[in-house]
Image (tube, coloured by chain):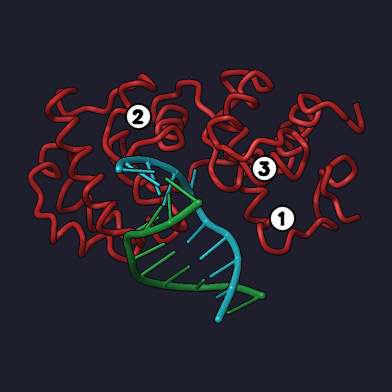
Chain colours: A red, B green, C cyan
Amino acid sequence: MGTPRSPKGRARETHKRLGFEYPDAKCELDHKNPFELLAATILSAQCTDKRVNMVTPNLFREYPDAESLSEASEVRVQELVRSTGFYVNKTKSLLGMAQALVDNHNGSVPSSMKELTALPGVGRKTANVVRSVALDLPGLPVDTHVGRLSRRIGITEEKDPVKVEMELNPMVAASERGLFSLRLILHGRRVCSSRKPVCEDCVLNDFCASSEI
DNA sequence: ATCCCGAGGG
DNA sequence: CCCTCTGGAT
């Protein structure tokens, strides 16, 4: 299978080659437990993980768990997370999320998709990050990178992230979905960038539907 | 479809 | 200046 043509063939070949390219791909949001990863992922919307990692140490020093965060001052949390953008909404999400954990889950992070997405500010992308990275459960986070690369390579034509996720899920073994997502993200940053992809350096350029080589 | 909304790169 | 960064709620 050198030059796959079917979407599933492209997905499997992509995962195989990126696995060789990025064997040690990991989540780059700093965190010590599921609660911290959940909060960091909420902050990561439309923001670099590097920027998130600059604010979370201060945030978690003052508010290390759901109990303390649920009672935090809204103005104080806004100050702490301001540089990540969308800070008014993100603060509301953080406080609401923490309150929901206290009220409905004894202060801990739930594991089901339904419970996670019921939390304020938590959609499927965030829920899948928490599930795959912190809870070791099946989850394929579809962010801007995963969506862009999947479309460029020819794995899907969908634009809606949820539809992309539904199409990709059956193409990848459940235990490898999180890793697949992380590798696409890494490749999206380093090679297949949004603005100016470096197709000459891409290990997928022989079968990529959008290759300019 | 639109809004939120700061920071860095080109 | 414009575009993009691990989105989610309305």
Could you say which disc has been placed on residue A117 in the image?
2
- Residue in view at x 50 percent, y 26 percent: A139
Question: CA gap, disc 2 to disc 3?
Answer: 30 Å
On the same chain: label 1 and label 3?
A: yes
Quick one: quadrant of the C terminus of chain A?
bottom right
Judge left or right: residue A144 versus residue A204.
left
Kindly identify which chain the residue marked by label 1 belongs to. Answer: A
The quadrant where residue A130 appears: top left
Dot 3: chain letter: A
Does label 2 or label 3 sit earlier along the sequence? 3
| Residue that numbered label 3 is attached to | A22
Q: Would residue A24 be found to the left or right of residue A27 on screen?
A: right
Q: Is residue A49 visible?
A: no
Q: Percent from the top left, x then y, of residue A57?
A: 28, 55
Q: Residue at x 28, y 59 (%)?
A: A87
Q: Amino acid at mark 3?
A: Tyr
What amino acid type is highlighted by mark number 2? Thr
CA distance for labels 1 and 3: 12 Å
Looking at this view, is A183 or A9 the one in front? Answer: A9
Q: Residue at x 18, y 38 (%)?
A: A98
Q: Which residue is mark 1?
A: A191
- Measured Cα–Cα span from mark 1 to mark 2: 32 Å
Q: Dot 1: within a 10 Å radius of its alpha carbon, few (fewer than 14), some, or many (20 or more) residues?
A: some
Q: Are marks 2 and 3 in contact (CB under 8 Å)?
A: no
Kind of element beneath mark 2? helix
Subunit ID for the residue under disc 2: A
